[in-house]
Structures are given as C-alpha cells and as structure tokens.
C-alpha cells in the first residue's frame, strides 16, 4: 500500500523534475563510486610504494652503519642519520641502536617537540639519555595502529597521530644492532588530496554540463506536451480551429499531428451535426407551426362553419315551430338535440385550439383551461398570474407554446401525479415570462421518469417546444414531495 | 313605429333564417343585412337603424372591432351580440365596448326577440345562461387569507424566500441565490406555507402580491 502510494507520488512529479532527478542521481552515484574507488586504490598503491621506499632506506642505512657501529664512531653515525633526513623529507625520525639495543644516534624532524608518546613507548631507550617526562605533561599524539606487517628481515609498525600516519621500519644491522626509520605520509596525503580535489572538480563540471543538457532535454520534451495540453483544453471549449504546434518528428510530434487531424475532423463533424441540428430544429418548428395552423383552422372551421350551420338549423326549426305543423314537444326535442350538437362542436373546437388564446391571450386562455380541468377532474387547480396589462401581448408563437406546454404539464399531473392540489402560476415580466406548474402529488425521480416511455416522450416534447423559442424547462421533483415544472422564456431580442 | 334592424353575420344561411324568424314580429323591420363588418360600417353611413345584431367571429373584422368603430361614431346605436362564444372574456369585452345585449346563437328565438325589445327600450340584455359568468367575475377570487398573521409572522429569511418563490425561482435557484442548501429552502418553504396557511404556490404568489412583497422588484 505504502509502496504503491510512494510510487504514485514519484510518478506524479513533473516530467522535467524526473529528467533532472535522474541526471543528478546518475551523476552522483557514478561520481561517488569512482571517487571512493580511485581513492582506495591510490591509498593502496601509494602506501605500498611508501613502505618499500622506507624499507629500502632502512636497509641501505643499516648496510652503511654496520661498520660504524662496530667502531663506535658516533659522529659518523650522526652524519649518516642527518644525510638520510636531508635526502628524504618524509622521514620523521631515525634511530640507530647498537648490539645491546643502546641508542647510538637519533634524529627527529617533528615540526614541534618530539612526541612524548614515542619517548614513552621507547622509555627504556630514552631514559638512558633523557629524563623521563612526567605522565601529566604527556601529549598523546601517537597511537599504535594494530596492524603489524612482518617481513623476514624487517619489522613494520604504524603509528597514527593527528598529523598523519607514521610508518616505522626496523631492520637489523647484519653485524648487530638495529636501524629504525619512521616516515610520515604528508606527501602521499598531499598527492591524494590533490587528485581527489581535481576529481571532485571534474565531477562538479560534469554535473553542471549534464544538468544543463538534461534541462534542455526536459524543456524539449515538456514544451510540446504542454503545448498539446493547452490545445486540448482549447478544443474542449469547442475551439475547433485550434492547432497544436509540431516541434519535431518524434513520437510527440506525431502525436501533435494526430491531434491536429483529430481537431480538423471534429470541426467537420461538428459542422455536420450543427447542420443536421439546424435542419431538425427547423423541421420541428415547421411541424409545430403547421400543426398549430391546422388546429387553428380546424377549430375555426368547426366553430364558425359547422357551429353556424347548426345555428341556422336551429333557427329553421324555430321558424317551423311557428308554422305549427307538428306537436310542440317534437320541435323542442329537435331544438335540444341541435343545441347539444352546437355544444359538442364548440367544446371540440375549444379543445383543438381555444379561440380565447388568439383573441384574448395566454393569461385568459390558461385561466380558462385551469378552471375547466379543475371542474372536470376534481383536483383543485389554483391559477394565479402576475400579468401587468400595460405590457403588450406576447408574440403568438410564444403564447401558443406556453399554452401547449402548460396543457401537457397539467395533464401529466392529472394522469400520473395523484395530487391533492396543484397550481399554475404565470409571471409576465418585461424581459422574460415564467410559467410554473406545481403539484403535491407523488412526485418522481427526475432521472427515472425517462424510463417510462410515454412520460419521457411527453417531457422531451415539452422541452423541445420550449427550446424552439429559446426557453428553458426545469423540473424539480422528488418522490413523495410533488413536482414542479418551470418554463422560462427570455423576451429579449427578436422573437 | 317599427324597430329597424340590421343583421351582420358572415353566414348567409344563418342570416336568412334569422330574417325569416324576426320578420314574423309585426313591429320588426329588417332594413339591412351584411356579411362583413366593413359592409356594416359602410351601411351605417348610408342609413339609420335602431338595432344591430352582430356576430363576433367574422373573417375580415371581428365583432368587437366593428362595435368599437360604430359606437365611436354613433354612441346611441344599440348593438346586440349574437354569437356562439360562451366565454366570460368575450362577454366582458363586448359589454365594456358598449354592446347592450349578448345573446347566444343556441338560445331560443323568443329569447332573441325579447332581447331586441328590451334593448330597444333602453335596457341591457344578457343571455340568462351566461349571465352567471358576469356575477362570478365580479365576485372574483377569494382574497388571500389575512387572519393567519400575515407578513409579520415571517422571519426576514422566510420573507426573502417567500419573495423569491413568488418571483418564479425554483427551490434550487433560491437555495443557490441565498447560499443555503436545497433542504433548507424546502424547510423554510414548508414553514412559510404552514404559518400563512397557504396550500399552493399560486396562493403564495397572491399573498406576496397582496402584501407588496413583489413591489421592490
């Protein structure tokens, strides 16, 4: 879990950080490994050579001082010692001992005093000439390094002190006695330090060059990707003319080319869809318009022609009644039948398209329709309009649309809602008109309503009609909490 | 002296039936008969008559416009609307314009004769079967309930929500506008309705109008 999370965290850092990070990591690893490798091998070889050098100094010294020891020529011994120390700057001390290990001559080149440790270590020797220094004044700057290398004719001993290692080689003088040569490692240290420093410097230079290159590479990779990302975002906001810049002919460049092709195809596709949508909308518009015209003319025909004719028949019957050929009640029966017919025709015409809608407008027609439904269905429908009379009448197609949609919404309530009450509210403002049809019925899940094919079609039809006149239809409903359908139509611009 | 009558109706058959019916009355004289409002206005310039029987739905000029034009010139002219329209809006508009009678085509001939006589006498006549519409429109809607406390019993927040709902906001729009949750709006709305004893949004709107909540808009 934690590993995946860390991995995700690592993966989600920006690309240029990844590239730079890899560069730094590789340079550091390589640098560290080679630095320590080189240092270790330098130490190995230098100290090997150093030991051999000191051994050969000790040997050559011991071969030279054999005779001098026998003769006991102290001055010559001191002269030999001084020669060695002058010749080899790293030799720190030389001690020459006789057969009985007594010190015949010695010299020290420590920058300050002779280390007290050394004197302590060699106390028997030193005490023969020097007073034993007091323990409290001793400066402990020599520590024995445990490793002792044994060569048949020599004894190696390493001392470590803050100033560096001291390698002591003791070789026997063939005719008796011992030569001890102590050498420091200042030169080796200096050498190794110099090499290390130049190594570090090269590493630094490599790091700078490498990172600069890596940065350039990262920029070259990231820039086209960012450009592509921006283009994609522009495409998302329906800017189909956007194009990504093609920087190179690599994978990313080909991706950008593919993107550009895609954008072009999308534009074509979108244009086609728009074209089709336009045709569809104008078709629906025409269907709706033709349908309404048809309804209007059928209603007119029914009301004005058939109704009038029936009225004429009624008049004729009334005229016949005066002539009195038949019994009175026969005329009455016919008259009543004709009146019934007139009522039917009138109601039919009204249902097809109410004349009030054309003659007196939406407010009157809706009020009338709501009253009719209330009376016929028995659900109390309440109608209220906020409809300032000083505002001019709405264009006919808006009125008709609102009337039809309200009708549909009301009939939905009647058919499905099981409502106790419902209300229709019409708000006429100067800039918009709002119609709300609400009920307290069983409500529905706005998403689920579209499962019922009829209801879905009804709602879609309403939405479609409202959108034809640039309005919006909102449905708010919840199971058990009734429902509200609101239609809002802006009245700005050309209608 | 006979009552001079002109009949205006786009239906020739209806006109002749009507003429036959009315000519049986001794004191009625049909002095003219036209098929359109324009012809009637022309006719009125040429001759005098007492009663105009006028249809509402006619192809060129509606009855209402004809009545308006004629009454402007001849305020004393008695117009009786003879129509199939039974709706309150037509009745009200025509009476407002100044028609003196309103008779439905489906009523009996005696009723029309009676209407002509009483209008000629100077009375008004409205077909009994739709006179009820006039009364109900005068009585009008019940005023919003005042006994339940009115505006004072609402908190400022409730007042604001009441106003928004009465302006046509949906619940979720009101919630968005006031930066509160939909549930809160619904709860407030329930409280408002309960406090004011309102049952529907239509009543809420009426309440808002009556209490001047919409005025500041």
Image: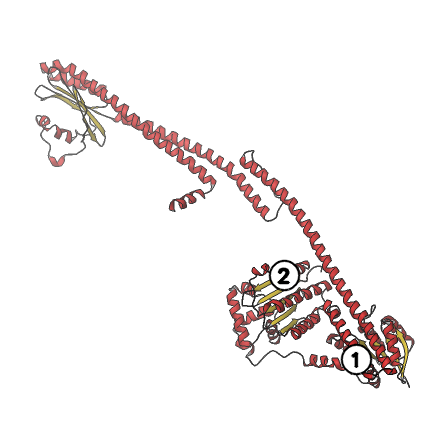
Q: Is residue A148 left or right of residue A45?
A: left
Q: Is residue A441 left or right of residue A105?
A: right
Secondary structure at badge 1 equals helix
Residue A333 is marked as 1
* Circle 1 residues within 10 Å: few <14, some 14–19, many ≥20: few
Q: Position of residue A291 (x, y in %)?
A: 74, 61
Q: Chain of mark 1?
A: A
The image shows residue A171, relative to residue B134, as above or below, that is: above
Residue for point 47% across, 40% down: A15
Q: Quadrant of the N terminus of chain B?
A: bottom right
Near-viewer residue (A111 or A10)? A10
Near-viewer residue (B45 or B51)? B51
Q: Position of residue A433 (x, y in %)?
A: 66, 65
The image shows residue B191, relative to residue A468, as above or below, that is: below
Alpha carbons under labels 2 and 1: distance apart: 44 Å
Near-viewer residue (B35 or A93)? B35
Q: Quadrant of the C terminus of chain B?
A: bottom right
Secondary structure at badge 2 equals helix
Q: Quadrant of residue A330?
A: bottom right
Q: Is residue B98 visible?
A: no
Dot 2 or dot 1: first in sequence order is 1
Residue for point 77% across, 74% down: A341
Question: How many marks are shown on the rendered structure?
Answer: 2
Q: Chain of mark 2?
A: A
Q: Position of residue A6 (x, y in %)?
A: 40, 44
């Amino acid at each position: 879990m934690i590993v995946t999370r860390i991995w995700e965290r690592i993966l989600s850092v920006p690309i240029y950080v990844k590239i730079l990070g890899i560069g730094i990591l590789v340079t550091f690893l390589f640098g560290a490994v080679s630095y320590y490798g080189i240092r270790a091998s330098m130490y190995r070889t230098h100290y090997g050579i150093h030991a051999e050098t000191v051994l050969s100094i000790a040997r050559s010294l011991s071969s030279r001082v054999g005779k001098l020891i026998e003769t006991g020529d102290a001055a010559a011994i001191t002269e030999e010692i001084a020669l060695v120390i002058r010749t080899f700057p790293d030799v720190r001390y030389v001690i020459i001992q006789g057969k009985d290990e007594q010190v015949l001559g010695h010299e020290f080149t420590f920058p300050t005093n002779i280390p007290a440790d050394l004197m302590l270590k060699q106390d028997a020797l030193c005490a023969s000439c020097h007073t034993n220094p007091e323990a409290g004044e001793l400066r402990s700057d020599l520590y024995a390094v445990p490793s002792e290398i044994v060569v048949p004719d020599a004894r190696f001993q390493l001392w470590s002190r803050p100033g560096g290692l001291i390698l002591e080689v003791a070789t026997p003088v063939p005719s008796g006695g011992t030569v001890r040569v102590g050498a420091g490692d200042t030169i080796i240290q200096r050498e190794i330090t110099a090499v290390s420093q130049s190594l570090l410097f090269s590493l630094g230079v490599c790091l700078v060059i490498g990172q600069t290159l890596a940065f350039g590479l990262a920029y070259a990779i990231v820039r086209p990707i960012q450009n592509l990302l921006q283009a994609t975002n522009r495409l998302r906001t329906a800017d189909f003319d956007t194009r990504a810049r093609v920087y190179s002919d690599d994978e990313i460049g080909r991706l950008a080319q593919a993107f550009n092709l895609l954008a072009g195809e999308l534009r074509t596709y979108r244009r086609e869809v728009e074209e089709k949508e336009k045709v569809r909308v104008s078709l629906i518009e025409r269907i709706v318009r033709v349908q309404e015209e048809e309804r209007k003319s059928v209603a007119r025909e029914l009301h004005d022609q058939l109704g009038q004719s029936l009225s004429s028949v009624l008049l004729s019957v009334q005229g016949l009644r005066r002539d009195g050929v038949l019994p009175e009640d026969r005329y009455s029966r016919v008259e009543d039948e004709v009146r019934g017919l007139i009522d039917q025709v009138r109601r039919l015409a009204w249902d097809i398209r109410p004349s009030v809608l054309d003659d007196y407008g939406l407010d009157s027609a809706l009020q009338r329709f709501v009253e009719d439904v209330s009376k016929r269905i028995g659900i109390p429908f309440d109608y209220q309009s906020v409809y300032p009379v000083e505002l001019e009448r709405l264009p006919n197609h808006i009125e008709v649309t609102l009337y039809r949609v309200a009708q549909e919404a009301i009939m939905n309530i009647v058919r499905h809602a099981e409502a106790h009450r419902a209300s229709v509210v019409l708000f006429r403002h100067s800039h918009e008109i709002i119609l709300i049809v609400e009920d307290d019925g069983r409500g529905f899940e706005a998403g689920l309503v579209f499962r019922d094919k009829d209801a879905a079609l009804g709602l879609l039809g309403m939405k479609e009609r409202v959108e034809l006149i640039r309005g919006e239809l909102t449905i708010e409903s919840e199971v058990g909490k009734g429902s509200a359908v609101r239609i809002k139509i802006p009245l700005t611009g050309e209608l | 002296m006979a009552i001079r009558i002109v009949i205006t109706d786009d239906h020739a058959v209806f006109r002749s039936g009507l003429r036959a019916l009315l000519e049986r009355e001794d004191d009625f004289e049909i002095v003219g008969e036209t098929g359109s409002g324009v012809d009637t206005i022309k006719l009125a310039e040429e001759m005098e008559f007492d009663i105009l029987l006028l249809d509402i739905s006619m192809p060129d000029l509606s009855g209402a416009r004809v009545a308006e034009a004629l009454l402007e010139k001849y305020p004393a002219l008695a117009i009786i609307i003879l129509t199939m329209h039974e709706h309150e809006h037509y009745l009200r508009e025509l009476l407002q314009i100044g028609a003196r009678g309103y008779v439905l085509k489906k009523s009996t001939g005696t009723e029309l004769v009676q209407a002509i006589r009483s209008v000629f006498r100077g009375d008004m006549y409205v077909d009994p079967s739709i006179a009820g519409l006039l009364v109900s429109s005068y009585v009008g809607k019940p005023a919003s309930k005042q006994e339940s406390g009115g505006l004072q019993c609402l908190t400022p927040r409730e007042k604001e929500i009441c106003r928004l709902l009465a302006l046509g906001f949906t619940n979720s729009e009101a919630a968005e506008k006031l930066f509160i949750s939909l549930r809160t709006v619904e709860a407030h709305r329930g409280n408002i309705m309960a406090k004011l004893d309102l049952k529907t949004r239509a009543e809420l709107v009426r309440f808002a109008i009556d209490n001047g909540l919409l005025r500041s808009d």
